[in-house]
Image (cartoon, rainbow, N blue to C red):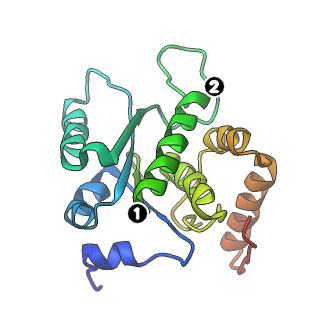
Amino acid sequence: METKTQQQILDNRKENQVCYITSLLGVQILSQEIIKRELNVISIREPKTQRDGDIQSQYHNINELYGDRCFSVYFQDIDFISKTSNLISPKKNQIKSILDWAKNKYQENNKMFVVHCFAGISRSSAVAMLINYIANGDLFAPYDVRFHSPNKLILEFGAEILGFDSTSVINKIKAISNAYFAGEEYRYEIF
């Protein structure tokens, strides 16, 4: 299997894609290329716990590497509003803050975004889809059915903030997933 360089990884994206989705490990592996290109980073992090000192130090390193080109937010990967203190769900005001920051950064420097969460599957893919929608109206460009399962609560909050119907987006994601797992090709139009 061919090993891709950092540059090849970031260059391998769809035409309308302004967000690259990755994991905590991925954002560290891609750090030299992110710094060289002066890309914007959105760091979606796990809330602090007593067991995760190593993870928190990795987050601290991300802040030091990217400085004011990094926006950090803390919530767990749950797609319902939690009423208990041990689960921290995304909040609408957090999603609005991410989107406001991203919109301002994109207008300021017109640079691509690297969006990461711990695994690079749910939270980061939902946020990347919303940012891509702000940048060029193509909600689905960063989405890859093979790797992503966008967090529904984040998409719902984003839909409220940006003024589109989250139900149709979630249904389209289901249709893409169902077609993929049935071995069929699914073509979607720009949302």
Residue 183's disc number: none
Q: Looking at the image, is 79 positioned above or below residue 137?
A: above
Residue beneath disc 1: 111
Identify residue type, mark 2.
Ile
- The image quarter in which residue 179 lies: bottom right
**For the residues marked 2 and 1, what is the alpha-carbon distance in whole angstroms?**
33 Å
Residue beneath disc 2: 81
* Front one among 165 and 172: 165
- The image quarter in which residue 99 lies: top right
Left/right placement of residue 19 relative to residue 165 reads: left
x and y percent of residue 135 in the render? 57, 60
Q: Looking at the image, is 52 positioned above or below residue 145?
A: above
Picture residue at 38% right of the left edge, 77% below the top: 11
Residue at the far front in the pictured view: 108
Identify residue type, mark 1.
Lys
State yes or no: discs 2 and 1 in contact (Cβ < 8 Å): no
x and y percent of residue 137 in the render? 67, 63
